[in-house]
């Protein structure tokens, strides 16, 4: 059926900036076209012809002009006036150089309704448009006065029976009202003139407010956008696939980043639909399927001077052994269980830049995946930047992409070379004469990444589109200085988890971690032990000083959970936090000191199928960290 390549588009209202900035960002992200939202045009100081030329200069087609409101079903004299208004919009469209206008269903209190009256109005408008070679698309707003369902809008278009009148589908309007997507499959694809896509988090609120403020890119929210797109694809629809996102955070965010996220969401969506509907031809660039995230292979710290000595002191206390040094770089490798930590003291390069900006900080991570090259290829197909990662003679070229405020995300796998990166890129060091006492840490349980609340949907999209994952609902974590939005990405198949924390303001512990400017990094690393009490004892003997938790927390915990007094005492003495889940799941947490601009280690034990991250304990951990930061000997390394 469909033979034309996929045409991607985005409504100018979806991103921040002046019209010129928007066009540049949209074009750079790889879109083919734009919907011109009337307000963007009205705010622009230039003629419609200039807008059209500017778009074409950026290689962008104007796919749609919108919106034309409150047109149909009106009594006279309003009806005549509506047709006059349409004529003026048509003039504008000719100047812009677009042939399609979006008419959204009327919300006018004086609109009469009546499906044949409405259909007749559209037939007449189709005639008017046809004289100028233009087309009219009708969209059912979820809060339209008489037409608020795509099935009714389709019936209007069917009865209007005019070649220049077609249907416009918008996933938000249909999915927010829980209309079955399968109802789209009976509509002829050539009568669907345009497709708008948006997702949204499930929030129980007024439809209009939800739509105007909380739409997100497909894949960032909770609506079944994949099912919707599968149904549209089944009709043979071959027109543009366009994002129409009203979101307060996006309007305040970076036009470049939001555009890249948008393009990623469309590529992911079409790739997913192609995989789920193998009999439907979908022209989207080939890419490997979603990958399996197996483990965190290494975490690399950028550091130097006293900060490096403090970090290494911590690593010794945590039971890591320095086993090797890099062949050509000032990087040492520390090992324990299934984990490696790299300590990078390079005097140049991105690690140095990260250290100079943030103090001792995580600069890179190494993720073990099922296929490193395929993961890299998928990431790049979805808009990630491949990283320049020069390898010295005899060193491995490890596939890596840009991420994490200038740092890299490396991909490793079980292939003969990549699985031996420690032996190939590093030279073994003689064993220490006084090795640290073993602490029993096995692997990385979760990486906790902190970002601004605006950047969070983009990171959710990055991980969930690249890997086979499941995401938890967004939770609010209370910092005494403000809210932190928290969401976990869990690898299917039991691999590591990534928790994303979006800081709403700069006064929270997470917020202060974000130095001015865009950025996102690993703020804490949770290491798993099978026996936290035993690990805590070994840590103590290694000279580890835990983050001190208030007595009141443990008194309350004992009372609230009815703990055995002996268990309560052990938790209290060890400064260990506890959370429980229904069905007997238990989570123990122990925190270390804060480093650099706010990095810390957490040690955790999971048992009985506990699946969370100790969110109820977060406020008490945060309060303890703030108390500790005020102490005179708090390290500022
Ligand atoms: Mg719409
Ligand atoms: Mg944690």
Image (tube, rainbow, N blue to C red):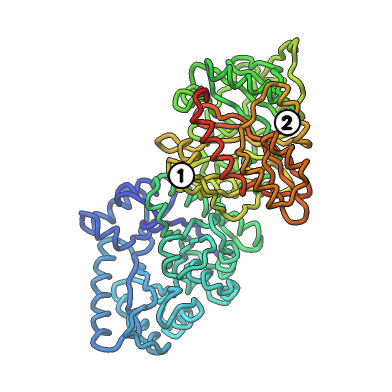
Is 265 on the left-hand or right-hand side of 119? right
Vertical arrangement, residue 356 with respect to residue 297, above or below: above
Q: Residue shown at 49%/45% (left/top)? A: 480
Q: Which of 160/453 is in front?
A: 453
Q: Where is residue 481 drawn, in percent x and y?
A: 46, 44
Instruction: Report helix, strand or loop for mark 1.
Output: loop
**Left or right: 538 as drawn, with respect to 263:** right
State which tag comes first along the sequence, 2 or 1: 1
- Quadrant of ligand 1: it is bottom left
Residue 146 place in picture, x, y as percent: 42, 83
Question: Residue 482: percent from the left, percent from the top?
Answer: 46, 47
> On the image, numbered disc 2 is attached to which residue?
536
Quickly name the residue at label 1. Answer: 481
Image quadrant in which you'd find residue 604: top right
Q: Is residue 89 left or right of residue 29?
A: left
Crowding around mark 2 (Cα neighbors within 10 Å: few <14, some 14 to 19, many 20+) is many
- Image label count: 2
In the visual, does 609 lie left or right of 92?
right
Q: Residues within 10 Å of mark 1 (few under 14, many from 20)?
A: some
Q: Secondary structure at mark 2?
A: helix
Q: Position of residue 211 (x, y in %)?
A: 44, 65
């Amino acid at each position: 059926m469909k033979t034309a390549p996929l045409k991607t588009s985005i409504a100018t209202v979806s991103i921040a900036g002046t019209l010129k900035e928007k066009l540049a960002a949209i074009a750079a992200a790889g879109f083919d076209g734009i919907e011109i939202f009337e307000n963007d045009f009205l705010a622009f100081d230039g003629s419609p012809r200039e807008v059209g030329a500017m778009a074409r200069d950026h290689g962008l087609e104007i796919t749609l002009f919108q919106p034309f409101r409150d047109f149909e079903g009106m009594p006279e004299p309003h009806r005549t006036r509506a047709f006059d208004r349409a004529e003026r919009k048509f003039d504008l469209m000719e100047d812009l150089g677009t042939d399609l206008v979006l008419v959204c269903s009327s919300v006018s209190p004086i609109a009469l309704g009546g499906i044949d009256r409405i259909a007749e109005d559209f037939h007449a408008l189709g005639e008017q448009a046809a004289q100028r070679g233009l087309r009219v698309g009708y969209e059912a707003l979820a809060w339209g006065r008489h037409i608020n369902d795509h099935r009714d809008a389709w019936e209007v278009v069917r009865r209007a029976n005019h070649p220049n009148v077609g249907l416009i589908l918008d996933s938000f309007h249909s999915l927010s009202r829980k209309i079955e997507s399968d109802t789209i499959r009976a509509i002829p694809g050539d009568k669907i003139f345009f497709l708008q896509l948006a997702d949204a988090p499930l929030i129980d609120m007024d439809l209009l407010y939800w739509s105007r403020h909380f739409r997100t890119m497909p894949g960032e929210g909770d609506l079944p956008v994949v099912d919707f797109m599968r149904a549209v694809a089944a009709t043979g629809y071959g027109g543009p696939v366009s994002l129409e996102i009203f979101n307060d955070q996006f309007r305040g965010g970076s036009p470049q980043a939001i555009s890249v996220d948008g393009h990623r969401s469309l590529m992911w969506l079409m790739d997913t639909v192609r995989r789920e509907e193998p009999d439907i031809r979908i022209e989207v660039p080939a890419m490997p399927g979603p990958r399996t995230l197996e483990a965190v292979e290494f975490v690399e710290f950028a550091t130097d001077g006293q900060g490096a000595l403090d970090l290494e002191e911590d690593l010794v206390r945590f039971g890591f052994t320095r086993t090797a040094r890099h062949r050509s770089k000032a990087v040492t490798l520390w090992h324990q269980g299934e984990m490696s930590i790299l300590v990078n003291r390079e005097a140049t390069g991105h690690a140095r830049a990260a250290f100079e900006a943030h103090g001792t900080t995580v600069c890179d991570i190494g993720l073990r995946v099922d296929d490193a090259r395929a993961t890299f290829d998928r990431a790049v197909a979805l808009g990630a930047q491949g990283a320049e990662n020069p390898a010295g003679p005899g060193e491995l070229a490890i596939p890596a992409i840009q991420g994490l405020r200038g740092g890299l995300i490396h991909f490793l796998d079980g292939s003969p070379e990549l699985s031996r990166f420690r032996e190939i890129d590093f030279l073994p060091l003689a064993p220490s004469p006084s090795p640290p006492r073993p602490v029993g840490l096995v692997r990385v349980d979760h990486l906790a990444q902190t970002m601004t609340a605006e950047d969070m949907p983009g990171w959710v999209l990055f991980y969930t589109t690249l890997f086979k994952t499941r995401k938890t609902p967004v939770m609010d974590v209370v910092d005494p200085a403000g809210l932190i939005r928290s969401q976990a990405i869990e690898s299917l198949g039991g691999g590591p988890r990534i928790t994303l924390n979006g800081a709403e303001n700069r006064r929270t512990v997470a917020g202060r971690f974000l130095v001015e400017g865009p950025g996102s990094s690993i703020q804490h690393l949770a290491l798993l032990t099978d026996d936290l009490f035993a690990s805590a004892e070994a840590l103590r003997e290694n000279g580890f000083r835990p983050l001190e938790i208030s007595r009141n927390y443990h008194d309350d915990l004992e009372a609230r959970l009815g703990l055995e007094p002996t268990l309560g005492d052990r938790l209290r003495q060890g400064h260990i936090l506890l959370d429980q889940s229904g069905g007997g799941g238990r989570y123990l947490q122990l925190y270390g000191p804060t480093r650099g601009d706010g990095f810390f280690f957490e040690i955790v034990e999971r048992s009985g199928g506990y699946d969370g991250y100790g969110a109820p304990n977060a406020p008490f951990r945060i309060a303890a960290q703030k108390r500790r930061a005020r102490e005179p000997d708090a390290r500022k390394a």
